[in-house]
């Protein structure tokens, strides 16, 4: 009796018992693996969204810094040659964008402004102010006395497909500075630049106020090397979240003083992912600008199609400190 019991116990597990154990172990391993993979993907997805938000904030900081020191901000009507930038008789003139560098249909100018920069630019040792100027060198004397120059800054929305950039769109910044070379008395003006205070003004730029002739001797360079990428993963879809372009609050059919004007204008099939509303107060007042900027995480690691509905948005309103011909007391 005892021998039979010992023999029964020493036989070990049956094949069925081993298979059941393996099945249970596999289920546990697969379940734990799936949970671990899901946790890793979730963490990666949250990291990607945080990176998009941080990059969006960085881009907005660039725009805010430029707007805060802007002397003149163009609204959407100006970009198309109307409104404040129309001809003296009120007729629409050649769109201002004609005089901007053309980077193709998929790289579109959205927001343009003039800022006043100190010389030498960025304290770059390549730019050296003249210590003395010949009496007949008016440009050298002007640089030596003014020690500052106006720069045209333009923000573009780039929706081209790129192997270098992963996002569906990106924000690019272009600057047209007055001087390409500034090394003592050796001074070279940047091609396409026109001083907005010499024979023209900000609204009429780059046309001669008297004759209406274009003062540009050549077009600005459209080399993409001059178009710095401020942020990737900017939403590139024009009307994906709204079938109608978003209008500015407080906008009126015929813009007047103290009215918001959208840039780009509603008549140009503008994007809803990046636009601005410029409060027109005339050239003697500081300008307020509302900016809307939306990101799109598509292309980031672990981002699923359904995650694209989470599109971070930043808005801000900036009062420009710079003024030109401001009337005292206004």
Image (cartoon, rainbow, N blue to C red):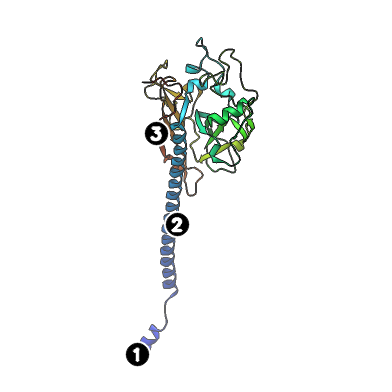
Q: Nearer the viewer, residue 123 or 65?
A: 123
Which mark is in front, 1 or 3? 3
Q: Is residue 51 above or below residue 280?
A: below
Q: Pointer 1 and pointer 3: residues touching (CB < 8 Å)?
A: no
Residue 112 visible in the shown view: no
Q: Pointer 3 and pointer 2: residues touching (CB < 8 Å)?
A: no
The furthest residue to the left: 1
Quadrant in which residue 320 is drawn: top left
Q: What element does badge 2 sit on?
A: helix
Which mark is in front, 1 or 2? 2
Q: Which mark is residue 37?
A: 2
First-in-chain label (1 vs 3) = 1
For mark 1, what is the residue?
2
Between the C-alphas of marks 1 and 2, the distance is: 52 Å
Q: Is residue 36 above or below residue 215?
A: below
Q: Which mark is residue 147?
A: none
Which mark is in front, 3 or 2? 3
Q: What element does badge 1 sit on?
A: helix
First-in-chain label (1 vs 2) = 1
Between the C-alphas of marks 3 and 2, the distance is: 39 Å
Quadrant in which residue 105 is drawn: top right
For mark 3, what is the residue?
316
* x then y, percent, for residue 284: 42, 20
């Amino acid at each position: 009796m005892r021998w039979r019991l010992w023999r029964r116990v020493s036989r070990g597990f049956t094949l069925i018992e081993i298979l059941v154990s393996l099945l249970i172990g596999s289920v546990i391993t697969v379940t734990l693996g799936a949970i671990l993979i899901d946790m890793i993907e979730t963490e990666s997805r949250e990291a990607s969204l945080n990176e998009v938000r941080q990059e969006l904030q960085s881009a907005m900081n660039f725009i805010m810094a430029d707007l805060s020191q802007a002397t003149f901000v163009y609204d959407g009507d100006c970009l198309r040659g109307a409104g404040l930038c129309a001809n003296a008789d009120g007729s629409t003139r050649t769109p201002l964008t004609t005089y901007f560098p053309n980077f193709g249909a998929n790289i579109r100018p959205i927001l343009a402004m003039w800022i006043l920069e100190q010389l030498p630019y960025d304290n770059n040792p390549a730019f050296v102010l003249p210590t003395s100027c010949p009496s007949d060198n008016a440009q050298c004397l002007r640089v030596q006395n003014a020690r500052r120059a106006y720069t045209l800054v333009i923000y573009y929305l780039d929706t081209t497909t790129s192997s270098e950039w992963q996002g569906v769109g990106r924000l690019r910044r272009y600057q047209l500075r007055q001087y390409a070379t500034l090394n003592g008395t050796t001074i070279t003006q940047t091609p396409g630049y026109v001083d907005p205070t010499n024979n023209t003004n900000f609204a009429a730029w780059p046309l001669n106020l008297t004759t209406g002739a274009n003062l540009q001797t050549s077009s600005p360079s459209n080399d993409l090397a001059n178009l710095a990428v401020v942020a990737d993963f900017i939403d590139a879809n024009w009307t994906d979240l709204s079938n109608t372009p978003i209008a500015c609050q407080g906008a009126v059919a015929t813009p007047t003083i103290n009215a918001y004007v959208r840039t780009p204008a509603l008549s140009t099939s503008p994007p809803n992912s990046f636009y601005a509303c410029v409060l027109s107060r005339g050239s003697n007042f500081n300008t307020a600008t509302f900016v809307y900027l939306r990101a799109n995480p598509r292309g980031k690691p672990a981002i699923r199609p359904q995650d694209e509905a989470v599109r971070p948005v930043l808005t801000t309103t900036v009062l420009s400190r710079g003024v030109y011909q401001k009337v005292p007391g206004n």
